[in-house]
């Protein structure tokens, strides 16, 4: 019987890359069809297929790593590189929106009144809900670090408590931000101010939701004894992503909410 | 206000009459010799949009400030000369209409 003579993971054939690609096609073409012909069929099919792909692909990765032992040290190193590269690409994604914001706000055009904030825009007070949101995310950074140390020290109950607290803080941020969006005196259609504000903070909010979901999956896995004190990369990846989301918020807060008011 | 020659003796009176530099005289002189907008170091680059807009704003702000103090608005003509030299006519027309309609976005 042949055994692998190396520590790497030669993955079994899987349909999920194909279904993921089909989902991407359905989402993009579906969005175009929705814009021009008012039909949501394709984009809905794309969303469903995307969610099914993500669930099953990541489920398979958990099976391969946690249950079948394929995540040896070199494999884990590759996963670490992968997560860091992905987060780096997300940094560049947000850099673009910050570029757009600074392009318009550093040299405001006559159409805006030559000033920033533009004439007629009532900005949000940076020392009200946005400051609370900053405190919430910073606190969640502390609780996620607490969770990490708990896992490393084998403190099961504390790990569950601190991870739960982190997720609750994430939900609290999302709830507060949703309230702000509802109550804001300006919309996305209010000139370049509205565009830069809602696109930048909107994508950030989406990333908070993604990060909270990632942490929630980690909580379920922690409860089901997937993590050991030495090996818990899924959690570490979620924590890195969460810190990234927090840092993006800090830049948003200082640039758009505070300086931009 | 006549600078440079303070004091009330005969010599300073004479000097003051010979070289009288009132602000409105200076402006009159500059406007009489006006050919086009001079180089403004505040706007050194090729894109002169801000130069045009700033002078348009300054003209209206000057009018508003001097009228409020019941002073002569003649010095404000300099800004008008500059923005009329620099700005596209369509921009000036649009901004004039906005000012009339009360929808001009600039702070005057």
Image: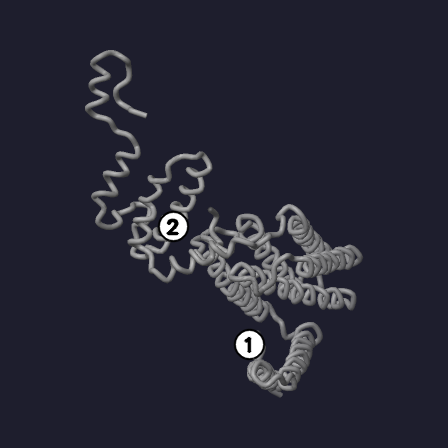
Query: Image check: B3 left or right of A247?
Result: left
Report how many numbered discs are placed on residues in the image: 2
Considering the numbered disc 2 on the image, is that residue within a helix, a strand or a loop?
helix
Depth order, front residue of A119/B10: B10
**Which chain does the numbered disc 2 sit on?**
B
Residue A121: x %, y % from top left = 57, 54
Depth order, front residue of B45/A15: B45
**Which chain does the numbered disc 1 sit on?**
A
Q: Which residue is mark 2?
A: B56
Residue A139: x %, y % from top left = 69, 50
* Mark number displayed over residue A227: none
Residue A9: x %, y % from top left = 58, 77
Mark yes or no: residue A219 visible: yes
Mark yes or no: residue A3 visible: no
Depth order, front residue of A97/B64: B64
Vertical arrangement, residue A77 with respect to residue A4, above or below: above
* Mark number displayed over residue A6: 1
């Amino acid at each position: 019987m042949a055994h692998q003579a190396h520590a790497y993971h030669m993955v079994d054939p899987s349909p999920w890359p194909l279904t993921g690609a089909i989902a991407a096609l359905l989402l993009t073409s579906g969005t175009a069809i929705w814009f021009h012909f008012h039909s949501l069929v394709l984009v809905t099919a794309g969303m469903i297929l995307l969610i099914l792909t993500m669930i099953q692909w990541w489920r398979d990765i958990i099976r391969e790593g946690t249950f079948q032992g394929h995540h040896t040290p070199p494999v884990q190193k590759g996963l670490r590189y992968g997560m860091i590269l992905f987060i780096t690409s997300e940094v560049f994604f947000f850099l673009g929106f910050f570029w757009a914001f600074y392009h318009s706000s550093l040299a405001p055009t006559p159409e805006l009144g030559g000033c920033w904030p533009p004439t007629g825009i009532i900005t949000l007070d940076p020392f009200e809900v946005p400051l609370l949101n900053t405190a919430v995310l910073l606190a969640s950074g502390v609780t996620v670090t607490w969770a990490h140390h708990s896992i490393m020290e084998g403190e099961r109950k504390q790990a569950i408590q601190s991870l739960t607290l982190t997720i609750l803080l994430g939900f609290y941020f999302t709830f507060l931000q949703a309230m702000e969006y509802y109550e804001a005196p300006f919309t996305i259609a209010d000139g370049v101010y509205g565009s830069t504000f809602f696109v930048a903070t909107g994508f950030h909010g989406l990333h908070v939701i993604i990060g909270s979901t990632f942490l929630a999956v980690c909580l379920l896995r922690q409860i089901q004894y997937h993590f050991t004190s030495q090996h818990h990369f899924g959690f570490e990846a979620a924590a890195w992503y969460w810190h990234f989301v927090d840092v993006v918020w800090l830049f948003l807060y200082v640039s758009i909410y505070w300086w931009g008011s | 206000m006549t600078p440079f020659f303070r004091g009330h003796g005969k010599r300073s009176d004479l000097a003051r009459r010979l070289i009288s530099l009132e602000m409105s005289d200076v402006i009159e002189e500059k406007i009489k010799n006006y050919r086009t907008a001079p180089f403004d170091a505040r706007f050194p680059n090729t894109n002169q949009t801000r130069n045009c807009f700033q002078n348009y704003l300054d003209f209206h702000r000057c009018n508003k400030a001097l009228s409020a103090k019941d002073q002569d608005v003649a010095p404000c003509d300099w800004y008008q000369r500059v923005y009329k030299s620099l700005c596209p006519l369509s921009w000036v027309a649009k901004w004039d209409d906005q000012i009339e309609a009360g929808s001009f976005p600039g702070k005057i």
